[in-house]
Amino acid sequence: MSGAKKRVAVVTGTRAEYGLLRPVCEKLQKSDELALELVVTGAHLSERYGNTVTEIEAQGMPIAARIPILNHPSTNLGTCHTIADAVSLFADYFAASRPDCVLVLGDRYEIFAAATAAAVLRIPLAHISGGDVTAGAADEFFRHSITKMASVHFPSCATYAARIIRMGEEPRRVFNVGGLGDENIRTMRLLDPAALAERFHFDFERPYLLITYHPVTLGGDPAAEVGALLAALDRFPDLGLIFTKANADAGGEVINRLLDDYVARRENAVAYTSMGAQGYLSAMKYCAAVVGNSSSGVVEAPSFQKPTVNIGDRQKGRLRCRSILDCGTGTEEITRTLRVALSPAFALGCKNSRSPYNGGDTSGRIVSLLAAFLDSDLAHRPKEFWDAPSAAEREDEEEN
């Protein structure tokens, strides 16, 4: 690549997503070919969800733009209005700044809005973590919509890469790079229990559960589901309980109010809006089990060989390791599954689990591949729908 560095606008809206994107941002800062422009939005800029932009600022990461969007109620209709506002705001920003590329991760509605604005403005869109399936969340259709708008794809495993290609994306635009969460676990300096206790004012030497429960955005009653979970947890009084609060989806505020009320009445429980990537992964390393419906229990926990109790359908469709136990949302079923997860026999079996998301230097590969892509004619060439040849078509080609 010759001439000025190409500018990559990286969009982040949540604590979890930024924890994954951070190594990519750091490598973009060091790149001789690409320049980072970090765009912060969503829950990062909301007092209701912890104003987690302060964590980004504390790390010294330069922020190019702040785009507040959470001005509507935490309901499905409110989410519709938020998406509409966000598309307009991102369109204005991208039209004025004209980055050479917009890089997004995952499947949230604010990321869908940013991707829509970039695609309509014909700015090349790069997408990390496409190809997953999560049948229990609206993230499912946001993710696949982003895939169809993106110019280049960085899925986290071979299965997801193959699915993107089956969706009609050209194989030369799809790169299996592994999971950023797995890379973080292997490369980040994690805290020991004493350092965790000093930072979070909780006893990390005692057995504890790490719990995250998000709204199931394609149905369900978040208050009833969390009530059932909390009733199950009350049957394990000897365990510490560490909750990380729900994200900025419809129903998230309801869940967070219930958690605040619950921990206020129990000495063995605490709830945090955000622990930061280092704090959260460190807590996962030493926990007895990961509980809830967050993707971290399915994607990251297997790298620690920790048991996961995955509740409900929110993660339905993702690849599973033997360390993951799925259950319904009722109190009795959660209780039974927790007892299995906490048994010595199951914990021993988890030691043989292997994460499917190990891609080595995932963030470095993304930056290198993105630089090469932006220096190629593919970056500005219209995509073609790729149809894999059928068996009959392959036979005809061989005969001819």
Image: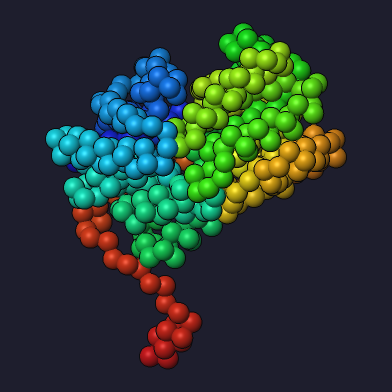
Q: Position of residue 325 (x, y in %)?
A: 72, 45
- At 51% from the left and 22% from the top, the residue drawn is 274
Q: Residue furthest bottom?
A: 399
In the image, 146: left or right of 85? right
- Residue at 79% x, 28% y is 235
The outermost residue toward the left is 96
Q: How is the image coloured?
A: rainbow
Residue occupying the point 76% across, 26% down: 234
Q: Quadrant of residue 364?
A: top left
137 vs 28, nearest the viewer:
137
Residue 19 on image: x %, y %? 47, 29
Q: Quadrant of the C terminus?
A: bottom left
- Left or right of 98 on screen, residue 135: right
| Residue 272, picture quadrant | top right
* Residue drawn at point x = 61 percent, y = 19 percent: 261
Q: Is residue 206 left or right of residue 22?
A: right
Quadrant of the snapshot with the N terminus: top left
